[in-house]
Image (cartoon, rainbow, N blue to C red):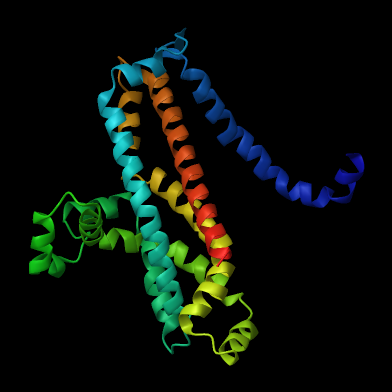
Amino acid sequence: MAKLFKGHKVGYLFVLPWIIGFITFTAYPIFYSLYLSFFQVTITAVGIDSNFLGAINYLEIFAMDVEYLAKLLDFFMEIMISTPLIVILALLIALLLNQPLPTRGFFRTIFFLPVIISSGPVLEKLIELEVTSIPTLRSYQFYQLLTVSRGFLVIDLIIYIIDHTIILLWLSGVQILIFIAALQKVDQQIYEAARIDGASIWEIFWKITLPNLFPMILVNIIYTVVMYSVTILNPIIDYIRYHMFRIETGFGYASALSWLYFIIITVVLLLLTSLFIFFEKKTSRR
């Protein structure tokens, strides 16, 4: 251990401020919130008064907090739909922007611009003004027919895409850049050899492009889930914040809500990662 530290001491010195900051400002609050989730916490003029409750906060969530469980279910369904859509949309746009176009630098800036200027209030204003979709699409007759036929999975998915087109585009900026960076690292000689052998564009995509992008697809899935779960527009975060400052519930109950939310996000990540690995194995066998 001493030899390892001696050989990399400069690197450890550079990392040390981050480690200290992570332990102080991230790790300690996280585990302290887990500790508080087992207490009834009251903030008084003298300090924090805590009364040990055991697992009562968690039991109350499942036994009484129907609104929170409904929000969790809605979040689970939305993230399972939105994550694949955002990743697929980012992949398609990245494939287009990776083409040798004279103005591709301009278009890359345009697609990444929402990442810079977007914030909770901006997105909230967009939703309030009902500009999260393309208005002209809603005026067509086919959209009216779709709304009448609600209840089928495919139709509901199409309606969701139409109603959330702008939001999906706004949330795909970082993923597009990650895919473009991955596409530029693929050896062009492989493409040339495939074209010489008579491979079609579709075969090149499935046999060369997609396998090389698999690691970045997984990265984008994880990034999208985490980004979606911590956005200020997430109603679960507002619900947790609401209970944090209530006298009847307080920090203890809010901490229990937060940790249950964390478990749900972890399950979603594991589920999407497992589905992706299963799809990758199926694709590699072809």
Q: In this rendering, is residue 137 above or below 14?
A: below
Q: Position of residue 46 (x, y in %)?
A: 44, 10
Q: In this rendering, is residue 21 above or below 254?
A: below
Q: Position of residue 82 (x, y in %)?
A: 35, 53
Q: Position of residue 176 (x, y in %)?
A: 45, 67
Q: Position of residue 216 (x, y in %)?
A: 55, 62
Q: Is residue 42 visible?
A: no
> Relative to 286, is 237 on the left or the right?
left
- Residue 184 placement: quadrant: bottom right
- Residue sitting farthest toward the front: 286
Q: Is residue 209 visible?
A: yes
> Relative to 200, is 23 on the left or the right?
right
Task: Residue at 46%, 34% (x, y): give it.
Answer: 262
User: Number of numbered discs present?
Assistant: 0
Task: Residue at 88%, 50% (x, y): give it.
Answer: 7
Looking at the rendered image, the quarter that the N terminus falls into is top right
Task: Residue at 48%, 18% (x, y): give it.
Answer: 36
Q: Nearer the viewer, residue 60 or 35?
A: 60
Q: Nearer the viewer, residue 263 or 10?
A: 263
Q: Nearer the viewer, residue 158 or 285?
A: 285
> Relative to 48, is 166 on the left or the right?
left
Looking at the rendered image, the quarter that the C terminus falls into is bottom right
- Residue sitting farthest toward the bottom: 196
- Residue sitting farthest toward the right: 3
Task: Residue at 36%, 59% (x, y): give it.
Answer: 85
- Residue 233 placement: quadrant: top left
